[in-house]
Image (cartoon, helix red, strand yellow):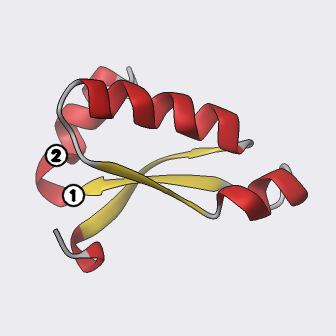
Amino acid sequence: MQTDDLIVVAEFTTSCEAELAKAALVGAGIHAEVRDAVMADIYPCVIAARLMVSAASADEARQLLHLE
């Protein structure tokens, strides 16, 4: 999967929150990546840790994370 195919499905204040959400998606078989994790921990509430998945998996990911 190319990283160009990934879209943001959620943003989190800390990398811990983002990694927990990523683990839930990976456990369900959805490839996920966390971006800007270090910056989110250095500058909480200013820069978000972004949870990225493929556009094709976005709706399923949002449902699994109860974002819809």
Image x and y of residue 58, in percent: 23, 46
Q: Which mark is residue 57?
A: 2
Q: Residue at x 85, y 50 (%)?
A: 44
Find out whether the residues at labels 1 and 2 contact each other: C-beta distance under 8 Å. Answer: yes
Query: Residue 19: x, y in percent?
Result: 55, 37
Which image quarter: residue 16? top right
What is the C-alpha distance between the residues marked 1 and 2? 5 Å
Label 1 environment density (alpha carbons within 10 Å; few <14, some 14–19, many ≥20):
many
Q: Is residue 36 visible in the rendered structure shown here?
A: yes
Per the image, the residue denoted by label 1 is 54
* Residue 65 marker: none
Q: Amino acid at mark 2?
A: Ser
* Residue type of the residue flagged with mark 1: Ser
Q: Measuring from the top left, give residue 38's x and y in whole percent.
A: 74, 60
In the rendered view, tell whether residue 23 sits above or below residue 56. Answer: above
Secondary structure under badge 2? helix
Residue 3, given in percent of the width and then of the height, sits at 29, 74
* In this rendering, position of residue 9 left or right of residue 61: right
